[in-house]
Amino acid sequence: MGQADSAAPQLPPRICFLVHDLGDAAVKRRVRMLEAGGAEVQLAGFRRGEAPIEPDASVTPLDLGRTHDRAFVRRILSVLGGLGKMRAMAGRIGRIDAIVARNLEMLALAVRLNALLPRRVPITYECLDIHPLMLGNGPVGSSLRLLEGWLARRCDLLVTSSPQYLQKYFSELSQVRLPSMLVPNKVLDVDGHIVQSLARRKDPRRAGPPWRIGWFGIIRCRRSLEALRQLAVEGAGAIEVVIRGRPAYTELENFDAVVDETPNLRFEGPYENPRDLARIYADVHFSWAIDYLYAGKNSEWALANRIYEGGLYGAIPLAVEGTATATWLASAGVGIVLDDALIPAFRRAVASLDDQRYAQMQQSLAEIPRAEFVADAKECSRLVKAILDPMRADEHAIRA
């Protein structure tokens, strides 16, 4: 028998992905990205609701129990309970080549799990939001940063989504000192179908009025909801608001009442990413890429997926000045940046728009290389390679 015949088939790398919310659409997107990069994924984590998480076609998650939004003490108790489950989990998951931990609480579980494995594997700390508790000068903030730094010394790579997270938090406040990799929240297109379909597509949108604003994703910003409500009411039909996604009722207890009581504002439920993106963004003129939930810190540093989705599908992104999103749009020469007085600023912005000017703004978006908005199979492969070999992460960098 020849050497090629006797060689055992090479198994794909196997990554354990520990997450704080198994039902989060962003988690599903990252799983698809890791799989497109050539990895087999073992997903494990907590769920937000009572019902168990349904498995996807390729991944059956390990359910560590229920945790809660904005219930910090209960989340700590969930993590402590999760620590106790790591020995059993280590016996169940089989071969693992790397661990990715999304958020600080999952990083604690990752370090514990790694200590129980037959051999140590690289750990990637994925941090896509900086919680306000991490930023305080008091004992809570200082203790959390101390814990984060202690855990990070047992890790190998930091993955985050915005350069300002690195500049404003990890360089200035955090004790994390790791090789880092930027993985922006781009639209995932692993087979090239999205880019190909865009090349053939003619955008039929005409300028308003009525001007239609789309607010898509996790709906959690109270100030955004109030601003959009006021625009819809005072616009008297000249401005319409379409909301789609998952409302965070812990932040917006009155969301349903606002929708029911506000003319020209409607909520059209959840959507599937990326399957429904072309349809929902084609229905609006503007993409609301504004968030005040953690004003002054995380909300200013983030680069939300809405700028990539809206940019890709021709909906003009709206940002507020002084944010990383506004800086990104200004550097690309696209979108509309509003001052902090959102309502009069938006009215002024659309007052000068007609069919020709709006078409020019869409053309500016269309002229940006699609790689700025889309993560393709090559980017997925670079991410997996960096997770498996963090010391060479710089070689696999993804442009923000």
Image (cartoon, rainbow, N blue to C red):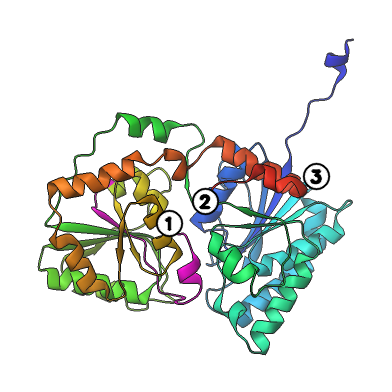
Between discs 2 and 3, the one toward the N terminus: 3
What residue do we see at 78% from left, 46% from top? 97
Q: Nearer the viewer, residue 244 or 321?
A: 321
Checking the image for residue 38, the label placed there is none
Quarter where residue 378 is shown: top right
Between discs 3 and 1, the one toward the N terminus: 3
> In the picture shown, does residue 248 fall above or below 56?
below
Give the CA distance from mark 2 to mark 3.
Answer: 33 Å
Residue 27 highlighted magenta (yes or no): no
Residue to which mark 2 is pinned: 400
Q: Which residues are magenta?
A: 282-304
| Main secondary structure found in the magenta portion | loop
Under mark 1, the amino acid is Trp
Q: Is residue 84 left or right of residue 55?
A: right
x, y percent for residue 80: 73, 74
Marks 2 & 1, CB-CB < 8 Å contact: yes
Checking the image for residue 328, the label placed there is 1
Determine whether the residue tagged by mark 2 lies in a helix, strand or loop.
Answer: loop
> In the picture shown, does residue 199 fall above or below 135?
above
Determine whether the residue tagged by mark 3 lies in a helix, strand or loop.
Answer: loop
What residue do we see at 60% from left, 71% from top? 169
Quarter where residue 229 is shown: bottom left
Query: Taking the image as drawn, is residue 260 in sight?
Result: no
Residue to which mark 3 is pinned: 95
Determine whether the residue tagged by mark 1 lies in a helix, strand or loop.
Answer: helix
Query: Taking the image as drawn, is residue 159 in sight?
Result: yes
What is the number of callouts on the image?
3
**Mark 1 burial class by Cα count in 10 Å: few <14, some 14-19, many 20+:** some
Give the CA distance from mark 3 to mark 1.
Answer: 41 Å
- Comparing marks 2 and 3, which lies closer to the viewer? 2
x, y percent for residue 55: 57, 49
Q: Nearer the viewer, residue 183 or 107?
A: 183
